Amino acid sequence: MKPSTKTVLTFGVISGCLSSLMMLLTVPFLDRIGFDYGEYLGYTAIVASFLPIYFGIRAYRDNVAGGTLTFGRGFLVGLMIAVISSLFYVATWEVVYFKLVPDFAAKYTAHAVDHMKRTGATQEKIDETMRQMQMLKQYLDNPLTNAAMTLVEPLPIGVLIALISAGVLRRSRDRISAAATDLPSR
């Protein structure tokens, strides 16, 4: 296995395991957390689970690329780590949705309708939301569309973290040489 492949797989699996673990740890508390706070908690967990992207790009730069890294190469490494991690997220959600919380769609619909009633929505708006929720349930009940919809949650965040990390970690040979000549001699 090439060192770059090993780096991407290692940090992708670490990130994916973190993502899966954090999702699974919240399942027993879904009813207590609620959908409003659950969204904040979920996206915070996604960001936290993508932190290995930074370390993966840095490991690639330091151990594989000889201390140099272009923005494009760093972004590509980070993107591959993000994709692997996102696939773990999707696989875990499929298990959660179909096996651990099979009534998720019904609970989410009840939450949405209750929220609309509390905020004074008209019956027409509530009925429209119910129709939308029935369509959403149909999509979620199909594993392929469920997976596609779920992938859209973490992947853009992973891409953003890969972009930021690649920008922070890029290093050219010229910058390394300049930094070495700026060191005081003894």
Image (cartoon, grey):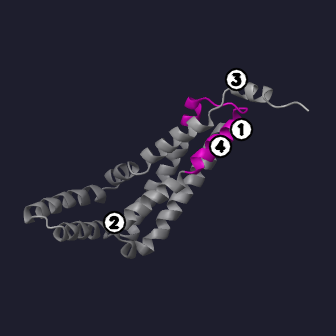
Classify mark 2: residues with Cα within 10 Å, few (<14), some (14-19) or many (20+): few
Nearer to us in this view, 50 or 176: 176
| Location of residue 168 in the rendering, given as x and y in whole percent from the top left corner | 59, 38
Residue 98 visible in the displayed image: no
Residue beneath disc 3: 174
Give residue 8's quadrant in the image: top right
Residue beneath disc 2: 36
Which quadrant of the figure contains the N terminus?
top right
Report the magenta residues as a range.
51-76
Classify mark 4: residues with Cα within 10 Å, few (<14), some (14-19) or many (20+): many
Nearer to us in this view, 56 or 9: 56
Q: Amino acid at mark 4?
A: Thr
Q: Amino acid at mark 3?
A: Asp
**Label 1 SS:** helix
Q: CA distance from mark 4 to mark 1?
A: 11 Å
**Label 3 SS:** helix
Q: Is residue 84 magenta?
A: no
Residue beneath disc 1: 62
Q: Are circles 1 and 3 on residues that touch, CB within 8 Å?
A: no
Compared with residue 33, is residue 4 higher up or lower down, i.e. above or below?
A: above
Q: CA distance from mark 1 to mark 3?
A: 16 Å
Q: CA distance from mark 4 to mark 2?
A: 37 Å
Q: Is residue 183 left or right of residue 93?
A: right
Q: Residue at x 48, y 67 (%)?
A: 24
Q: CA distance from mark 3 to mark 2?
A: 49 Å
Mark found first going from the N terminus, 3 or 2: 2
Mark found first going from the N terminus, 4 or 2: 4
Q: Nearer the viewer, mark 4 or mark 3?
A: 3
Q: Nearer the viewer, mark 2 or mark 1?
A: 2
What label sits on residue 7 in the rendered view?
Answer: 4
